[in-house]
Every structure is written in C-alpha cells, then in structure tokens.
Amino acid sequence: MATSARGVVTVDLAAVVANWRLLHDRHAPGAVAGVVKADGYGLGAGPVARALYAAGCGHFFVAQLGEGMALRAAIGPGPMIAVLNGFAPGADEDAGLMPVLNTLGDVARHRGRPAILHLDTGMARLGLDAREQARLAEDAELRNSLDLRFVMTHLACADEPAHPLNALQAARFAEAAALFPGIPRSFANSSGSFLGQGFASDLARPGCALYGINPQPGGPNPMRPVMRLDVPVLQVREIGTGDTVGYGASWGAPRPSRIATVAAGYADGYLRSLSGRASAAIGDRPVPLVGRVSMDLITLDVTEFPDVVQGTQVTLIGGPSCSPDELAAACGTIGYEILTSLGPRYARVYLPA
C-alpha cells in the first residue's frame, strides 16, 4: 500500500478478543454479547463477529434487520443474532434472527416466537414505557404467550457513574423484570459493566469497549487499542513565512515550513471539525494538522520531519496523541463517531485473533 493513495484501516482482532475476555471476566458468571451494529462500529462486523464467536461469544446484537441478515451470512448458524430495532410488520421472520420487542404491537405480533423484550427504564427511546409495562402486567394471557429468551433495558448515563439515573434504572428494571420470573435478564452496556455488581445480569451487551473506546471517560482506559488508520503522503511542498494553507486561508505559516498533503478528508470520515485541533503521528511522534480538513485531503506541518517524502505513511487514528478518544475530545464528540465515520475508500486489513 506504500505506493497507493489509499489509506488502510488495520484491525487487531486479537485485541478485540482480549477486550471481550476482559469484559467477560468482569461480568462472570453472566455471559457477554458482542454488539456489532453499524458494521462492527466501522471496523467490519463479519471479521469481528467470527473472531468473537471462535473465542466463545454466543450472542450478538445489531441494530437493523439487514445488518442481521448480513451477519448471519457471515458467521453461519449457531450464535444468537438479535435485532435491536425489531422487525417491521411483514418483515422476513425466517432469517434465523431474533427480534427485540419494543412496543405492545411487537408483542402481539410475536406471540409464541423466540424474542427479547425491551423494557424502557429511563432512556425514552425504544422499549415498552411504564404505561405499556402496566398494560402487559394486567394481561396475563398475552404475557404468558410470549417465548422470551431475555428481558432487557438500556442504561442512559452509565458513562457517568455518579448519575442518579443509573440506580433509578436498576430499581425500575428489577421491578419490571419481576413480571417475568425465570427469564434471563440483559442489562449493562460497555460503561455499565464498570458500575459494579448491581448492574450485572445474565447477559451484558458491550459495544464500544470491544473496539478500544474508553468505557470510563475521564479515567484510564482498561481496553486494548484495536485499530489504526495509516495514509500515505501525496505531496510535500515548501512554503514561506505568512503563506496560507487550505480553504479559507485559516492557517498561516509562522516560519518557513514543509507541508505534507495526505489522502484523507471528511468524505472518508476524518471530521471537518478536527480542523486546526488534531494531530496525526509519524512513527511515535505527533505531527500537527494545519489548515481545514477538506473532502479528500488534509495538510500536516512536517517541518520537523525532514525525511517525510511522497509515500511516507502517516497514522491519522490510533497513534500517539491520536487515539479515537483523543480525536473525539479534540472536536467535541465521542470515539464512537470517529470509528463509525470511517469511509469505504479505506482498505481494511485484519490481524488474526
């Protein structure tokens, strides 16, 4: 790839598996699923899920039916694949997937079929709200007609351990799930796995932590880094003091400078909001991004790197000072967005588990 203008996302599947095992050890004796929605958070749902399945993960979650069908084709029969957004009326229900029931209408349509019931306890997105839960509690016939494999809820503030909604959701979930004695429960997400034993269940559902995103914002990251994005330098030019770079002439050289142009931009998921705020890396040294991020190109100040030439590889994500979390902090977002924005023009390379 050194002579190509194409960037390469390298995914360390052994690190993904190590992160799953760390979460599994924290959550024992309950099981730990793999959330691989949005194409495995941008890193490839099929390769990630195959590596996790080989390591012993038997439960997977996606967001949409199409994602579930693609994942089933990628990993074959065996593990549970649940669709968080549920099945629309008339959807193919013979694809070997399990719907998450989010409304009373879903409940009525799926009598007698394997499913997961979502109980909303404070997120106010999907799931049966308190009124629907009360109606289901009053309808023993409907409740007893269900073939539930899990009841679940979703934490809204797990990345803020002191937030009072965490304890409130735990209490609400315990009360609502008591309507279904003997049915396994699914509770914690990535950050919820670090909230303590009161948030353990029969099945945790981590997503971001599998991919190296810090589940404890503000504290040390216990997860192994999983991905790296390397792109080649297309051109290096010399500019003088006061010369400007890029759209809007937003950056002017404070000295005679060397500027490297790199083949990545916001069309590839390298966010425009990183303009003037981020660093890349050459080897183990940070190199500043200068000028605005454009659709296909970014520019770096390589004045301190005299050996940089056309074809030199630059690490945009995953190197020193440019982890997904660090880039996210630089532009006011979260590491999830950095990963899920990775564009299709990058090649994907997988290191074996």
Image (cartoon, rainbow, N blue to C red):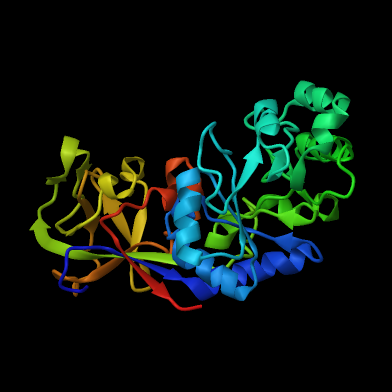
The structure residue drawn at horizontal position 87% and vertical position 24%, both measured from the top left corner, is 138
* Observer-nearest of 36 and 302: 36
The structure residue drawn at horizontal position 32% and vertical position 52%, both measured from the top left corner, is 343
Residue 326 visible in the picture: no
Vertical relation: 338 (above or below) 100: below
Vertical relation: 35 (above or below) 20: above
Vertical relation: 282 (above or below) 93: below
Task: Give the mark count.
Answer: 0
Q: Answer left or right for 96 relative to 196.
A: left
Residue 237 in the image, given as x and y percentages of width and height: 10, 60
- Give the quadrant of residue 275: top left
Image quarter where the N terminus lies is bottom left
Residue 63 visible in the picture: yes
Residue 152 in the image, given as x and y percentages of width and height: 73, 43
Q: Answer left or right for 212 relative to 4.
A: right
Residue 100 in the image, given as x and y percentages of width and height: 64, 41
Residue 82 in the image, given as x and y percentages of width and height: 61, 50
- Give the quadrant of residue 172: top right
The structure residue drawn at horizontal position 47% and vertical position 49%, both measured from the top left corner, is 67
Q: Answer left or right for 25 relative to 55.
A: right
Vertical relation: 13 (above or below) 240: below
